[in-house]
Amino acid sequence: MYYFLSHLSFVDICFTSYVTPKFISDLLVKRKTISYGHCMLQVFAMHFFGMTEVLILTVMAFDCYETICKPLHYIIIMNRTKSISWF
């Protein structure tokens, strides 16, 4: 669980450090248009970081479900997952 929390916080930092300053700078400029390349880069970054966050939250929800609903099987499931993750 802590593994996912650390990665979730990293993705949140990446999302806010890229999207927010760019969005604010685009609002403060007199010219209200941005180039097509910058627009596509911003859309890609928003979708990439957003979907990564959704994926991590989904895995965390499944981990929480396994912990609560199958407490005796949790140790076996996590050991198998841990051994598979190294291959």
Image: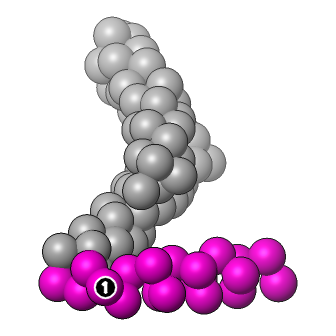
- Residue at image point 48% right, 25% down: 17
Q: Please state which of residues 38 and 62 is positioned toward the viewer in this rendering.
A: 62
Q: Is residue 57 above or below residue 39?
A: below
Please give the residue where the numbered disc 1 appears in the rendered image.
72
Residue 65, can we see it? no
Place of residue 15 in the rendered image (x, y in percent of width and height, measured from the top left): 45, 38
Q: Please state which of residues 41 and 13 is positioned toward the viewer in this rendering.
A: 13
Q: Quadrant of the C terminus?
A: bottom right
Q: Is residue 14 above or below residue 4?
A: above
Place of residue 71 in the rendered image (x, y in percent of width and height, measured from the top left): 26, 80
Residue 56 in which image quadrant: bottom left
Place of residue 83 in the rendered image (x, y in percent of width and height, measured from the top left): 71, 82
Please state if 6 lies on the left or on the right of 69 as rendered: right
Residue 55, can we see it? yes
Q: Is residue 15 one of those drawn in magenta?
A: no
Please state if 38 lies on the left or on the right of 73 as rendered: right
Magenta stretch, main secondary structure, is helix
Magenta region: which residues? Answer: 69-87
Q: Helix, strand, or loop for circle 1? A: loop
- Residue at image point 31% right, 85% down: 72
Q: Quadrant of the N terminus?
A: bottom left
- Residue at image point 64% right, 76% down: 82
Please state if 70 lies on the left or on the right of 26 as rendered: left
Q: Residues within 10 Å of mark 1 (few under 14, many from 20)?
A: few
Q: Is residue 71 one of those drawn in magenta?
A: yes
Place of residue 68 in the rendered image (x, y in percent of width and height, measured from the top left): 18, 74
Residue 58 in which image quadrant: bottom left
- Residue at image point 34% right, 18% down: 24
Q: Amino acid at mark 1?
A: Leu
